Amino acid sequence: MVPVENAAAGEGVAGTPGLASQRWRTLGEEGRSIVSGIEVLFVEAGFVAPVRTAAGTHRSRPLVFVRVVTDAGEGWGECAALADTTYDREDAATAFRTLTTAGVPRLVGSAGASGGRLPTPGRCATVVAAAGCGPLASAAVEMAVGDAHLRSAGQSLASCVSGRAEGSAPAAARASVGGVLGMGADVGALLEAADRLVSEGMSRLKVKIAPGYDVEPLTAVRDRYPRVGLQADANGSYAGVPGGPPLALDDLDLVCVEQPLGVGDFDGHARLAEARSTPICLDESLDSAASVRRALALGACSVVCVKPARLGGIGQALEACEAVTGLGFPLWIGGMFESGYGRAANAGIATGPGRWLPGDLSRPSGYLEHPVTDDPEYVRAGAGGFPPPGGPLQLVVPSGPGLAPPPEPARLRPWCRQRRWFPRR
């Protein structure tokens, strides 16, 4: 396998597995922040170009933001739900509806019953899930509540994950960046897209595949870039295909094949993993820390894609990371076409211990038609090595208070299609 381990991520940052998730869930336990109200915004960002996968083609990118206002400041969360349900059971419109009709009113009412005190992220996740919100919607609220507590305490997510006092770590941690290649019209177009991503500094390329579109495109990319980390993402498209993906993929030195079979087929993935030399990675099958532990115990995967939103929030994501790291398996941060705020927040999770591979952390301005927030800070990690020139691209993990620099309401306003404000009564 091509070595793509993200040695730079979390440089100088240490942590004890099992404690990071607890630190996150109990944020604000001793705090006194009083909730003024919570706002939910539905923003239409759009895609620069349609994104084609085996599960369908994504043509627009709505974003749902949650803003928690307290007497000590604000906290922001972002919902990762897409425009339709080809990829998840929740779409953005459903998430907005469940948040505004049930989840947020229930949370505001819960805060009112406790004198207006902002709950911990752990308590928040319980209240919102009990109101009937799905994991993607719940994750957005938990994110906003945790962000508010971090800002109030002057703490970054990286310091919370690591357990270090703010300012005690060396220079800011960085997370290596991988790029995603949708299913192109032809191999020539795919290679042009690969050339662009490599020139931008991507140290890993993930190619979307499906039956009939697999060996040829992956071979073309591997021949062009023999040293790049190369993944294949099937989005479950080989469910029902005897034997799964072609055996020829084992000859391409892939980092892993992601989600070849159906969401619930842990046993099938375990059989496939036993029969193949290419590691199996799961994504859509993993919707909680418990499902991650089950998949690893069954041998259904040996690489884990960590998507905080699908797992139900940062608390569940950190718990999953602890389980994977404790067993010594590699993991990486998956993406769902977030804004710059969501991208930077996800990168903060990768500052904990573990064998981190380059994640889906590319520049949002490269795929969002209207980048409603600024891109995070990116740097090139030196002049040598691969890919040239300038070395691999890395995202600088935010070190200031909160999850990341927050969205600016004035910047969101032109693209905001709906908003609801829920004052504490």
Image (cartoon, grey):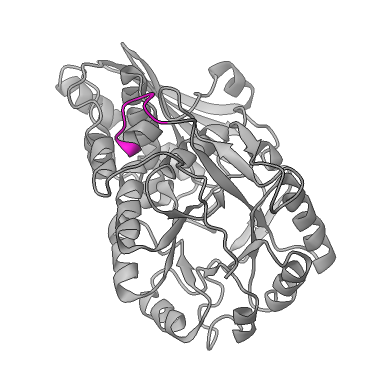
**Placement of the N terminus among the 4 image quadrants:** bottom right
Residue 1 colored in magenta in the image: no
Name the residue rendered at 48%, 72% in the picture: 280
Question: Taken as a whole, is the magenta stretch helix, strand or loop?
Answer: loop
Report x, y in % for residue 276: 50, 83
- Identify the magenta region: 162-169
Report which quarter residue 114 is drawn in: top left
**Residue 64: image location, x then y, percent:** 49, 35
Left or right? Give the position of 167 relative to 225.
left
Q: Position of residue 256 (x, y in %)?
A: 54, 69
| Residue 102 in view of the camera | no
The answer to whether any part of residue 210 appears in the image is yes
- Between 186 and 255, which is closer to the camera in this rendering? 255
User: Which of 314 and 61 lies nearest the eye of the viewer?
Assistant: 314
Q: Judge whether 408 appears above or below 100 on screen.
A: above
Q: Quadrant of residue 402?
A: top left
In the depicted structure, whether residue 88 falls above or below residue 368: below
